[in-house]
Image (tube, grey):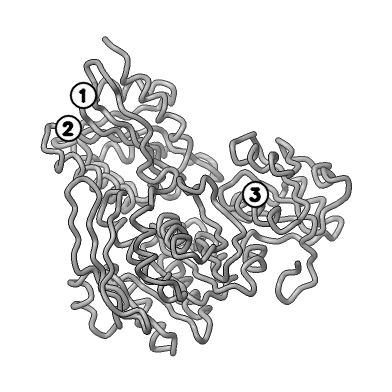
Amino acid sequence: MTTPGTDVDLSRVHLIGIGGSGMSGVAHILLDRGAVVTGSDVKDSLPVRALRARGAQIAVGHAAENLNLAGEAPTAVVTSFAAIPQDNPELARARAESIPVLRRSDVLAELMEGYTQVLFAGTHGKTSTTSMAVVALQAAGEEPSFAIGGQLNRAGTNAHHGQGRVFAAEADESDASLLRYAPDVAVVTNIEPDHLDYFGDAESYFQVFDDFADRVADTGTFVVCLDDDNAVECGRRAAQRGVAVLGYGTAAAAAAHPDVPAGAVIAQESQRGGPASVRVALAVAGAEGDVEYTMSVPGHHMVLNSVAALLAGALAGADPQRLAAGLSEYTGVRRRFEFTGEVAEGERAGARVYDDYAHHPTEVAAVLGAAREKVDAEGNDARVIVCFQPHLYSRTQEFAAEFAAALSLADAAVVLDIFGARETPVEGVDSRIITDRIERETTEVRYEPDFSAAPATVRELTRAGDIVLTMGAGTVTMLAGEILSALAQEG
């Protein structure tokens, strides 16, 4: 294997940060295709252990000698320029010895060569929509290859080398790496300013989606959500440049944007707390007509994501009715309204704990809205409790007011300290810039700087039948099980 336009050999590949959701996916596909895979990460983890079980040699901790884990130096080193510092000793050695250093997107672009490429981009919903498309394509008999930013509940993995002609993948805009791809079908779920630590301003962030539209193959299609004004505008601009554009969304949105051809319109949607019944009118050449399915994951935003997956699969040539049957079987992806457990008995009997990756205000609002729909449909006095961990100092500063407004949708909010990830702490910035803004007349608020005390704090606020959500892109996911155990305690 070589990367397009280069002579880089991918027969022996070393991945720095191999346990990450994106990196581990690439590693799985490389192993599927017979490459020798080595790597390193700062800690052991389930993804690391899964790769070791398949033959990858992985070190915990970063050191220059890790490049010899397979007995000889790798032919390529893969890194994430956003997550891995430039002074990483493995990167330094690779440069000193002139070993090609690639981004994950470079390798994924190579792995997708020769396939019908179906890519999903957008500020929110990429992982869920890609996952839905994969399940639908599998049900349609396409046997797709895929790379997703999260683990499919049904498949138990985040990447796979399939035997079919389609490759479905999540296209990450956070560092503009989506511009490495040349999709046949490109979907944009929505566009809202984010990752301003990389882009600097909203205009530069919006521009990356315009540039992504220009990467679509001459015979391909750029798909935008008609319910998102920024996505619609991006589609309009792409159409003016000669890109084939189709929209998807609600009937009201399709009517509001008649100049963007609608490829898939929600003709009927029924949400009653349980599975949503959905009927979609498709208008794709050779695949016209209505299809019906159910969605077991809650929330209107998930229905919109399913319509995007359906349209993308139809544009890739899969049978719409079989795609719809697959969507009815979709059970979700890890950390997207993922059910952790329910308290069986005692004073908090019926309280349920879910875990979600939401880390942008719009995502937080969508998930809390879906939880609210669920408890309202049950018709009891259950409440929505959220344990939220902000992700990145820059994002928290930029969107503190928006986070507060979103968290005000919960009956009670426990807000942990900021998970800095790749960023260093900022003087005077902590989660109180969010909690001080939350509407306290409707939401009980607790700022909890002690991570280990969070389960007890959540327990104090939770009653029988409540829905509790652990939420964020950092370590808060580790608390879901601990909170469930705390809720089951008496007294």
Provide the residue designation for mark 1: 463
Dot 1 alpha-carbon crowd within 10 angstroms: few under 14, some 14 to 19, many 20 or more: many
Q: Distance between the residues labelled 2 and 3?
A: 43 Å
Residue at point 48% right, 60% down? 138
Contact? badges 1 and 2 (CB < 8 Å): yes
Residue at point 36% right, 73% down? 224
Q: Give the secondary structure at mark 3.
A: loop
Residue 435: where, in percent of width, then height? 29, 36
Which mark is in front, 3 or 1?
A: 1
Dot 2 alpha-carbon crowd within 10 angstroms: few under 14, some 14 to 19, many 20 or more: many
Dot 3 alpha-carbon crowd within 10 angstroms: few under 14, some 14 to 19, many 20 or more: few
Q: Is residue 129 visible?
A: yes
Residue 9: where, in percent of width, then height? 80, 64
358 with respect to 183 (left or right)? left
Q: As rendered, which of 127 and 143 lies closer to the eye? A: 143
Residue 422: where, in percent of width, then height? 56, 45
Q: Give the secondary structure at mark 2.
A: loop
Residue at point 24% right, 22% down? 349
Q: As rendered, which of 272 and 420 lies closer to the eye? A: 272
Q: Can residue 402 be seen in this view?
A: no
Provide the residue designation for mark 3: 84
Amino acid type indicated by mark 3: Ile
The disc placed on residue 382 is: 2
